[in-house]
Each structure stands twice: as structure tokens, then as C-alpha cells.
Image: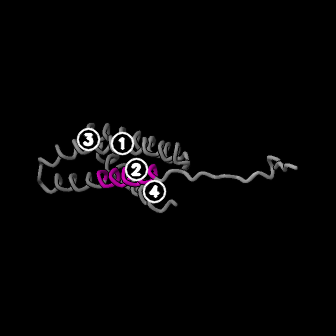
Amino acid sequence: MTTTQSRADAPVVRRHAPRWPCWVFRITSTVAAIMLFDQTVFAGQFLSGSYDSLHVHRENATFAGISVLISAVAAVLQRWPGRGPWWPILAYLGLFGLIGLQIVLGFSRAISLHIPLGVAIILLATALAVWAWRRR
């Protein structure tokens, strides 16, 4: 006599999501937040009279934007295969769009918009990095 189990009675085997995408996302989001925060340091140095810092501020803006794009790729990896949420992908792409607007405002010397937008960008990047480390 053989016994068979129906599909409803079959044991469910759950595979855990890989952990490496979470760590990649944590590291890239932290690097992006630090690079964006560095922008305030370079701007402050420029305003204090170190005029060479404006060049560093401009160059770091490019690398900070690239780091945000890398974080967007890491967010995709966190989603697939890491089974994480989808919204960090949109958040980092939106942040990249804000950085593009920030660069345009900086080159057009629209400082009254450039500075508050920079503060918002840094706060968003920091919030995303904190979320990455708090997520289980």
C-alpha cells in the first residue's frame, strides 16, 4: 500500500533570499550619502575663500551622481534576486533626477534654489542609507 500526499499537504520548502544584495545596497547607499554630504564641505570651503574648492565641488557632484546611479543598480539587485521592495529603485532614480536639476541650478548660479535643493538631496540620501541599514 502506498500513500501519496496531495499538493495541499505537501511540505512547503522556502528558500531564503540571498544576503549579498542587501550588503551591496547598504554599502553603495552609504557611499552615495557620504559623497553628497561632502558637497556641503566643499561648498563651505569655497564660501570661506578657498576658491579651488569650487572645482572639487563640481567634480565631486559628478562622482556623487554616479554613486547614486550605482545605488539604483544595487536597489535592483536587492529586488531581484534579493526579494526586497521595489520602491528604493524609484527613490534612487528620482534622487538622480534631482541631482541633475541641482547641477543645472549650480551652473546657472541659481544659488537661492541650489542650496535648499542640495539640503533636500542630502536628507533623502541619508534617509535611504539609514533605511538600508535598518532593514532586515
Given residues 15 and 75, the one toward you in this image is: 15
Q: Secondary structure at mark 2?
A: helix
- Give the spatial CA distance, label 4 vs label 2: 10 Å
Q: Secondary structure at mark 3?
A: loop
The residue that label 1 is drawn on is: 99
- Give the spatial CA distance, label 4 vs label 3: 34 Å
Identify the amino acid type marked 2: Val
The residue that label 3 is drawn on is: 109
The residue that label 2 is drawn on is: 24
Which mark is on residue 108? none
Whole-percent x and y of residue 56? Answer: 18, 46
- Main structural element of the magenta stretch: helix, strand or loop? helix
Q: Is residue 110 left or right of residue 94?
A: left
- Give the spatial CA distance, label 1 vs label 4: 20 Å
Identify the amino acid type marked 1: Ile
Identify the amino acid type marked 4: Ala
Identify the amino acid type marked 3: Arg
| Pointer 1 or 2: first along the chain | 2
| Pointer 1 or 4: first along the chain | 1
Given residues 22 and 4, the one toward you in this image is: 4
